[in-house]
């Protein structure tokens, strides 16, 4: 995730650089500050639920009806799960109680459940399951989602057209679908099936396996067959234009980079994503092959002031170099490898920030790499202390602290590179 709004705050703190690169100031960093904390839904503070470890989620089929002109969701979530204890008869999910579950279907019959507190959905199985049993159930629900964190479920407009997008990181998945709202239970695969009026397109994770017209509606069916954490599952719905860039990878794959962009921004998007091809090849050469190479990489445009690394399809506000390079880096650091606790978020944001810096060293003028480093040092040392390890994981502002989780995290990696030397480091 990268919030471009922090830029303004940075100028006030350290107004000593003004280098520009590809139309984006290199001073961009990703701090959050009180502004985002104000948006933080109070109920979210009560939402740091302990994940139910008595069952392991394997698969989700998430079916939604979304009209971007209407702030609401109508959903059906089928999940496959495996019992992780003998006598499993209660399953605890997280789902906002502002969304009403109408029924839960299990083996063809409805079963009992309760919705309590702000985010607790407790499902009672009719009989207890032995350990390792694989089973499934379907949760049917609807309502008007709350929107926590950075805006987990947002309705807005662009060029007078409606859009709905989601951005769940860190705790917002439970605002709009029933999940285990933590970091420790990735499903192995996922189907996302969204019905929307036929003038819109739906962006999501994985491969678009079908686009079906029924009357005045279209059904977009996305399939993702890699492990994925709940906060990285996302949809965005509006009147997207689409195009594909092809990225040749080191393993011989011709990877499609699929772009869903606002029609009014098509030309800027094409230029920006064209520039990203060599960045994707650069990362692909530095680490393991692009992690989701059997499917795609891509972008969907949205209105939040930055970007979010939704798995295989980053959501971005624009197509500037730094933003695209940052979100792309997360596909390895954050998405493929996910930290086990939000206290270690610097492993996501530090790597993404550092790698964006590396692309400046590799592809842009030497001065932009120099300025990037000066910029980071000035910001990190503008306050005398603070750890990259998050000491309060109930605070979204602390988790995504720009100075510590992003910039100091990136400089910690740069320090390791300095100490180890390039051969050992890479
Ligand atoms: Zn990020």
Image (spheres, rainbow, N blue to C red):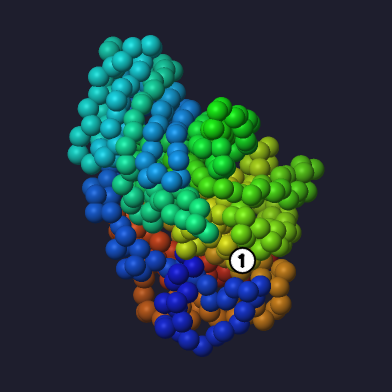
Whether residue 288 is visible, yes or no, is: no
> In the shown orientation, is residue 71 left or right of residue 17?
left
Picture coordinates of residue 21, whole percent (x, y): 64, 75
Disc 1 C-beta below 8 A from ligand 1:
no
Left or right for 395, reference 332: left
Q: Secondary structure at mark 1?
A: loop
Where is the C terminus found, in terms of image quarters?
A: bottom right
- At a point 45% along the width and 69% down the height, the residue shown is 5
Residue 160 lies, with reference to residue 59, above or below; the image says: below
Determine the image quadrant of residue 53: top left
Q: Nearer the viewer, residue 58 or 167?
A: 167
Q: Position of residue 244 (x, y in %)?
A: 71, 48
Query: 242 left or right of 189?
Result: right
- Whether 409 is drawn above or below 369: the answer is above
Residue at image coords 51%, 88%: 16
Determine the residue positioned at 45% across, 38% down.
66
Q: How many marks?
A: 1
Task: Return the x and y of residue 108 as percentages of the image width and height.
Answer: 38, 11
Residue at numbered disc 1 = 320
Residue at far left of view: 117
Along the line of sight, which residue is nearer the eye, 197 or 410? Answer: 197
- Identify the residue at the far bottom of this view: 16
Taking the spot 55% from the left edge, 57% from the top edge, the residue there is: 316
Q: Around disc 1, counting alpha carbons within 10 Å, would you say few (fewer than 14), some (14 to 19), or many (20 or more)?
A: many
Q: Position of residue 387 (x, y in %)?
A: 38, 67
Q: Is residue 164 visible?
A: yes
């Amino acid at each position: 995730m990268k919030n471009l709004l922090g830029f303004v705050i940075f100028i006030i703190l350290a107004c000593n650089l003004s280098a520009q690169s590809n139309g984006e100031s290199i001073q961009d960093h990703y701090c959050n500050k009180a502004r985002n904390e104000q948006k933080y839904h109070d109920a979210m503070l009560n939402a740091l639920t302990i994940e139910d470890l008595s069952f392991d989620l394997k698969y989700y089929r998430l079916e939604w009806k979304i009209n971007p002109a209407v702030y609401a969701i109508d959903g059906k979530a089928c999940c496959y799960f495996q019992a992780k204890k003998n006598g499993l008869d209660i399953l605890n999910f997280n789902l906002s109680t502002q969304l009403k579950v109408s029924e839960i279907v299990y083996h063809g019959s409805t079963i009992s459940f309760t919705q309590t507190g702000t985010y607790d959905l407790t499902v009672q199985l009719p009989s207890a399951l032995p350990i390792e049993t694989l089973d499934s159930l379907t949760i049917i629900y609807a309502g008007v989602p709350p929107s926590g964190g950075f805006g987990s479920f947002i309705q807005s407009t662009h060029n007078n057209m409606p859009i709905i997008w989601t951005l769940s990181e860190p705790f917002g998945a439970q605002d709009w679908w029933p999940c285990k709202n933590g970091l420790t239970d990735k499903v192995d695969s996922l189907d996302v099936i969204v019905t929307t009026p036929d003038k819109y397109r739906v962006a999501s994770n994985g491969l678009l396996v079908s686009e079906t017209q029924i009357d005045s509606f279209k059904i977009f069916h996305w399939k993702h067959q890699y492990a994925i954490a709940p906060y990285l599952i996302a949809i965005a719905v509006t009147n997207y234009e689409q195009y594909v860039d092809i990225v040749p990878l080191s393993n011989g794959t011709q990877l499609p980079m699929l772009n869903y962009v606002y029609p009014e921004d098509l030309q800027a998007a094409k230029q920006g994503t064209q520039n990203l091809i060599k960045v994707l090849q650069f990362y692909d050469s530095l680490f393991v092959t692009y992690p989701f190479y059997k499917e795609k990489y891509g972008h969907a445009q949205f209105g939040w002031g930055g970007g979010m690394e939704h798995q295989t399809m980053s959501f971005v506000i624009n197509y500037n170099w730094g933003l695209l390079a940052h979100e792309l880096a997360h596909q390895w650091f954050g998405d493929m490898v996910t930290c086990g606790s939000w206290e270690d978020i610097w492993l996501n944001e530090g790597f993404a920030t550092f790698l964006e810096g590396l692309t400046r060293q590799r592809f842009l003028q030497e001065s932009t790499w120099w300025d990037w480093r000066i910029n980071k040092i000035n910001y990190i040392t503008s306050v005398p202390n603070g750890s990259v390890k998050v000491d309060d994981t109930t605070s979204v502002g602390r988790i995504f602290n720009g100075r510590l989780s992003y910039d100091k995290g990136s400089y910690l990696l740069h320090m390791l590179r300095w100490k180890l030397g390039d051969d050992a480091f890479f």
